[in-house]
């Protein structure tokens, strides 16, 4: 069906009804002067960050700072090779982070489709097209169906003008615009969409002064640190203090034993580098980059790498309703006639679907009462349906979405709008207006008579002045309409009458009508919304709904999705403003909220200690998206303001991707902890060997070069490879980690100390045995210490015995080969101060390295990592 097929526009005249702007609008000179005075009609966008500033932001990471200090110390000692390795890690980490941010920014810019590229204005008495940025206050702008309003303005004239303001207010039902109306109905706002009719508007505010601009101004301030960044910052400070203290002890012990000062200073710095897991930034970056790549495969654009991990720490997901949890389009779901009820099944505006009564699909021939109801609803209708095209892959609505929903319902019953228009052509009409709350049309019947078709709000149609039905029938319909309204439906009553001969004068059209039934219309939840909410609750995440829509509608959607089950879990913006809403974190549904109140709600949850994710698509969601720990915006339906405020953009608008992102975030955090267990256990072992060795008759158990070589091999490729470990299949069955929990919490410290002590014990035992038997004990300790740590790396796998992460197997094999090369290659022997070992000693070292793998697996099996137990009460309230 094309744009005009079966659609007749109202015949009301459009004229200038009020205001001071003349019919000719501004002159070109005056427009130029105002443009110079007010500036371009653009919302101040977030300035593009220079590359050098992005690099500095990456280098400010606490662990990167620790690495920079370590690199400076190694350069000061003349160890340029190890300094080069550390600087390489820093460089790779920085480049990956900057490239990811730039790519995400470019992808989001490619999604920009909300801003109006042009506007029609009247200047010098002539209509002309100008860029939206060139519209100025005082301009006379012409708007029509399909146009995006370029600026705020007052309506001077209108013909059935209807605007979709959901992106600005969250209200799912379009608003009629009339001259001399109240504040809501007499003005239009920038960024809203005209869905029906046409009109003239005098511009009153542009750019930052518009409603859209004022909302954008609430989004100031840079995003704070993510939960992982907070944890790693605390960890970095603690580790730095402990490392300095231990290195001071080693230095002091060496000097007391009479070791050269220069040697002990180098040894102390080497231990400091060994204790710092310098691969941690690379591990975190790799894990985040892999998560971002997986998200991209799922049509989600990660604008900032840390956002991937943040979702894994989320305890509360605050979501918008219209266009996020719902389809953002109206659907006629419930039909009622005096013979019974029926449901309409289908998605979107696609005519494909069915009408179900008593559990069975019916057609127009099976249900004449439903056919009569929907045929009149389709005749008394100015909307049209547009099939998929090159520019729009889905069926779309032209005109009022509510009327389009009626056309879809009729098509799913097997009725054709074009056939109805041919059989019953429209003769006259009384257009809908907000005072009458109904629309009436007159159609020529094939036998020469006329049919009156009327639809409107129940309180407007179910009246004795209009209907000729018995009072009990009208009472039944009124009770059913009230029941549907309580369930969140927008209800329309439909009536008609047939008359012989020519149409009578208009006053007689709306009398003696016969009630055909009721239609319940709702912006339906997306098919993926309920599974998404269920998965979030199963994972211990509290879902809350924040919308600008009507409380009944919000309550109905929340009830269907399982977000709220009790009335006391619903509050409104008015109650928040008057202070009667109680504790905001005790509520699960917030309706009729303003952008400022959405901001207050997010801040209340964060103030209670929660990590909050906010999902939305509208301009009114922008401030809350920016304020939340992580903002998730819809890419297709979402506005530019929402996309720019978000950390994650769902290019396919599928909320189920959020669950996958949460799983990715938890995988990242689990791999960071897995690496820390491995790396810190190795660092602990090295420190214990250096501290305890002198008491066992070994004045300097390992040379500084040997410590750095072991550290390079074990923390290098194998450590980074641990960041690519697959996700634990049970990760979404546990609640999120409490935000206040340390990255080494939940029992990780004892495991680190145990494994460190075990590796140190094995190394020291080998050293004492080798010294007592006359073997090159220092080389034996060097080989065993490195090889055993690599065994621990293999034992740290998430899925042992599989090829889920072949990179780790290759990395461990290469590192083990290089460790052996440090004993057998002459060049490396000279560099490291080692001696060649007999093959029997090499075999002993290899067997002992296997003990690291076995003990690590036994520890994981006998004392598995404690599942998270959220300390936040709301995180436990998931039922």
Image (cartoon, grey):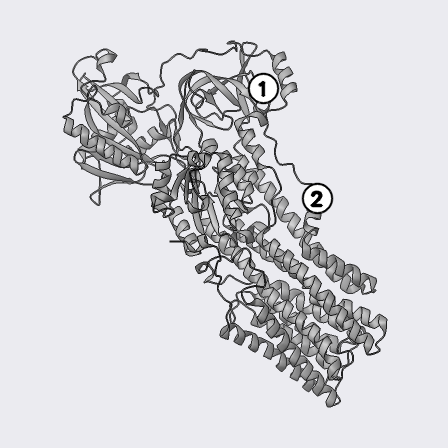
Query: Could you tell whether 606 is left or right of 30 in the image?
Result: left
Question: Dot 1 corresponds to which residue?
Answer: 136
Expressed as whole percent of the image width and height from the top left, the position of residue 742 reads 58, 60
Q: Residues within 10 Å of mark 2 (few under 14, many from 20)?
A: few
Expressed as whole percent of the image width and height from the top left, the position of residue 545 reads 42, 43
Query: Could you tell whether 385 is left or right of 747 in the image?
Result: left
Tag shown at residue 53: 2
Expressed as whole percent of the image width and height from the top left, the position of residue 590 reads 42, 40
Expressed as whole percent of the image width and height from the top left, the position of residue 841 reads 69, 85
Tell me, yes or no, if residue 649 can be seen here.
no
Is 793 placed above or below 34 here?
below
User: Helix, strand or loop at disc 1?
Assistant: loop
Tell me, yes or no, if residue 500 can be seen here.
yes
Instruction: Tell me how far mark 1 sits from mark 2, CA to CA.
Output: 35 Å
- Residue appearing at x 61%, y 34% in the figure: 45
Residue closest to the far bottom: 773
Is 820 placed above or below 716 here?
below
Taking depth in this image into account, of 865 and 176 the one nearest to the observer is 865
Taking depth in this image into account, of 417 and 367 the one nearest to the observer is 367
Query: Where on the picture, by quarter, is residue 68?
Result: bottom right
């Amino acid at each position: 069906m094309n744009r005009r097929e079966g659609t007749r526009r109202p015949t009301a005249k459009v004229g200038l009804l009020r205001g001071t702007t003349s019919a000719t609008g501004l002159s070109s000179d005056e427009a130029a002067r105002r443009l110079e005075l007010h500036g371009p009609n653009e919302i101040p966008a977030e300035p593009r960050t220079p590359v050098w500033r992005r690099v500095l932001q990456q280098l400010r990471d606490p662990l990167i700072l620790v690495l920079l200090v370590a690199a400076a110390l190694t350069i000061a000692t003349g160890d340029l090779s190890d300094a080069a390795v550390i600087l390489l890690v820093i460089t790779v980490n920085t480049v990956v982070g900057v490239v990811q941010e730039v790519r995400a920014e470019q992808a989001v810019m490619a999604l920009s489709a909300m801003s109006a590229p042009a506007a029609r204005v009247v200047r010098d008495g002539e209509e002309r097209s100008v860029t939206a940025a060139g519209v100025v206050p005082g301009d006379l702008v012409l708007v029509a169906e399909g146009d995006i309003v370029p600026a705020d303005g007052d309506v001077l004239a209108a013909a059935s003008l209807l605007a979709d303001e959901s992106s600005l207010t969250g209200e799912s039902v379009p608003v009629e615009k009339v001259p001399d109306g109240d504040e809501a109905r007499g003005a239009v706002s920038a960024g809203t969409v005209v869905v029906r009719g046409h009109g003239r508007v005098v511009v009153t505010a542009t750019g930052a002064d518009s409603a859209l601009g004022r909302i954008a101004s609430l989004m100031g301030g840079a995003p704070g640190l993510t939960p992982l960044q907070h944890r790693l910052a605390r960890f970095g400070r603690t580790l730095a203090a402990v490392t300095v203290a231990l290195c001071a002890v080693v230095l002091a012990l060496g000097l007391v034993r009479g070791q050269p000062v220069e040697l002990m200073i180098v040894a102390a710095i080497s231990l400091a580098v060994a204790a710092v897991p310098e691969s941690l930034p690379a591990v975190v970056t790799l894990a985040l980059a892999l998560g971002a790549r997986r998200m991209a495969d799922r049509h989600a654009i990660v604008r900032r790498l840390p956002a991937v991990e943040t979702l894994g720490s989320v305890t509360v997901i605050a979501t918008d309703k219209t266009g996020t949890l719902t389809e953002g389009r109206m659907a006629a779901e419930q039909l009622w006639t005096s013979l019974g009820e029926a449901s309409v099944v289908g998605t979107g505006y696609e005519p494909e679907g069915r009408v179900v009564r008593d559990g069975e699909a019916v057609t127009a021939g099976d249900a004449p009462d439903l056919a009569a109801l929907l045929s009149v609803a389709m005749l008394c209708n100015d909307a049209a349906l547009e099939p998929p095209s090159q520019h729009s892959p889905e069926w779309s609505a032209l005109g009022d979405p509510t009327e389009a929903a009626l056309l879809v319902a009729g098509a799913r019953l097997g009725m054709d709008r074009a056939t109805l228009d041919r059989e019953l052509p429209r003769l006259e009409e009384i257009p809908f207006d907000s005072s009458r709350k109904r629309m009436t049309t007159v159609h020529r019947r094939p036998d020469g008579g006329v049919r009156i078709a009327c639809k409107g709000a129940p309180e407007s149609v179910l009246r004795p002045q209009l209907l000729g039905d018995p009072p009990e029938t009208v009472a039944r319909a009124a009770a059913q309409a009230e029941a549907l309204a309580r369930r969140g439906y927008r209800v329309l009553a439909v009536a008609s009458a047939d008359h012989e001969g020519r149409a009578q004068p208009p006053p007689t059209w709306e009398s003696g009508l016969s009630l055909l039934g009721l239609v319940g219309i709702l912006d339906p939840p997306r098919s993926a919304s309920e599974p998404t909410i269920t998965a979030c609750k199963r994972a211990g995440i509290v879902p809350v709904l924040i919308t600008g829509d009507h409380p009944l509608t919000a309550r109905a959607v929340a009830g269907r999705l399982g977000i709220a089950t009790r009335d006391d879990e619903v509050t409104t913006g008015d109650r928040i403003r008057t202070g009667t809403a109680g504790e905001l974190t005790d509520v699960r549904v917030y309706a009729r909220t303003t952008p400022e109140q959405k901001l207050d709600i997010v801040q209340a949850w964060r103030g209670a200690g929660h990590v909050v994710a906010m999902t939305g698509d509208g301009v009114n969601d922008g401030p809350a998206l920016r304020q939340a720990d992580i903002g998730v915006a819809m890419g297709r339906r979402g506005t530019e303001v929402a996309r720019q405020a978000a950390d994650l953009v769902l290019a396919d608008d599928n909320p189920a991707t959020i669950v996958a992102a949460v799983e990715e975030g938890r995988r990242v955090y689990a791999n960071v902890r897995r690496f820390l267990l491995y790396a810190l256990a190795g660092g602990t072992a090295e420190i214990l060997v250096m501290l305890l060795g002198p008491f066992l008759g070994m004045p300097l158990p390992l040379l500084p070069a040997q410590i750095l070589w072991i550290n390079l091999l074990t923390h290098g490729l194998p450590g980074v490879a641990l960041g690519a470990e697959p996700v634990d299949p049970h990760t979404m069955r546990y609640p999120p980690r409490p935000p206040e929990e340390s990255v080494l919490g939940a029992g990780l410290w004892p495991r680190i100390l145990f494994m460190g002590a075990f590796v140190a014990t094995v190394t020291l035992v080998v050293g004492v045995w080798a010294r007592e038997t006359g073997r090159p004990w220092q080389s034996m300790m060097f080989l065993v210490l490195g090889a055993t740590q690599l065994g621990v790396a293999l034992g740290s796998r998430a899925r042992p015995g599989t090829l889920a992460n072949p990179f780790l197997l290759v990395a461990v094999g290469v590192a083990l080969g290089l460790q052996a090369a440090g004993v057998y290659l002459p060049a490396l022997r000279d560099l490291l101060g080692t001696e060649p070992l007999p093959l029997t000693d090499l075999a002993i070292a290899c067997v002992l390295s296997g003990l690291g793998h076995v003990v690590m697996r036994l520890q994981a099996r006998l004392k598995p990592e404690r599942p998270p137990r959220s300390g936040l009460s709301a995180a436990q309230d998931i039922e």
